[in-house]
Image: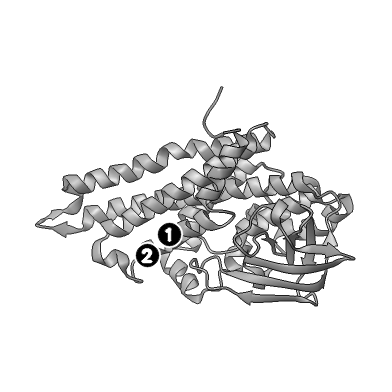
Amino acid sequence: MHFGLTEEQQLLQETVRGFIAGECPPTRLRELFDEGKGHDPALWKGLSEMGLTGLMIPEEVGGAGLELLDMALVMEEVGGGALPGPLLPHALACLAIQLGGDDAQRKRWLPALASGDQIATLALCEQGDVWEAEHFAVSLEGGALRGTKRHVPLAAIADLLVVATADGGFAVLERGASGATIVDEEGIDHSRPIATLTLDGAPAEALANAGPDVAGRVRDAALVLLAADAFGAAWNLTRQTVEYAKSRQQFGAPIAQFQSVKHQLADMATTIEPTRGLFWFAAHAWDREEPGAARDCAIAKAHITECACEIARAAVELHGGIGFTWECDVHLWLKRAMFDQTWCGAPAHHRARIGALGDW
């Protein structure tokens, strides 16, 4: 049995890594972060040309037909580069349409989403930090949506909004629909701005085959992709901090030579590296619909995102006084890790689910 990545998967990661390094270096990343729009059409075009906007969409409707594990490997690189943009919610919205739509709906919406000509996002959360379908209150009656969704990523630029409804289903809402109001929220990660979506009779189309099982699958995929993104961010912060410790002089020597600093750097690396297998295995289990896949996805999200935030805080501390300033790039990844930890449910929420799923 082979426990590593295939040559194709390694090449996929190398390609994405090279694209991010060339097209969104720290100087460009900071410009986009300061703008706060969370979207650069040039970057999106590049991602589209590489096929990433339709990575999990079947080939017959214009996608690459790859698996969640492949998308997770892409998200590791995206998190490592703190790449702005709607790739995460776009991929999840496409997945909801693929799993919950009928043939006509898939043929109608997925080709333009796969090519990147249109952008989609996913509206999950409701008031009170509610992320689970069984507690949603947004209703779809007579083709009209009513209710409020919170923390919707990049809602302002999305051509399609896939909205989770009270019955465990999904409805597709087009940009500019009457009765839909989008108000920006003060999110911490400016590379992925969020908004409140208020629905007052907004016309929408229900996905024909959606239901609690599909909603659960989409949620679990989100958990894996957030974990992968956080993993990439944590490893980037570890590498940045090692390089800083080698160059920062104190008492006539690099601080990397100090035993206490060595211990902290070693702790950062040994905290995050063993978690790689968690999101790999969770994605593998999701792809094959293993009986315990939901629990595996929750474990990966809860543990990896929490570890990433711990590493981010350590990176800030090891950068000393400059680490707390806006001019230091470390805060870009710190805020990314915080987004990954909280979006789609905090670790405490998923640990409670882990216990329930394990009959504890």
- 3 and 348: which one is in front? 348
Furthest residue to the left? 251
The residue sitting at 71% across, 58% down in the picture is 136
Q: Dot 1: few (<14), some (14–19), or many (≥20) neighbours within 10 Å?
A: many
Note whether residue 11 is visible: no
Mark 1 secondary-structure assignment:
helix
- Amino acid type for the residue under numbered disc 1: Trp
Q: Do labels 1 and 2 touch, CB within 8 Å? A: yes
Q: Which residue is mark 1?
A: 333
Q: Is residue 260 left or right of residue 303?
A: left
The residue sitting at 85% across, 55% down in the picture is 105
Q: Is residue 246 left or right of residue 77?
A: left
On the image, which quarter does residue 202 sit in? bottom right
- 139 and 22: which one is in front? 139
332 in relation to 5, above or below: below
Residue 41 in the image: x percent, y percent? Answer: 61, 69
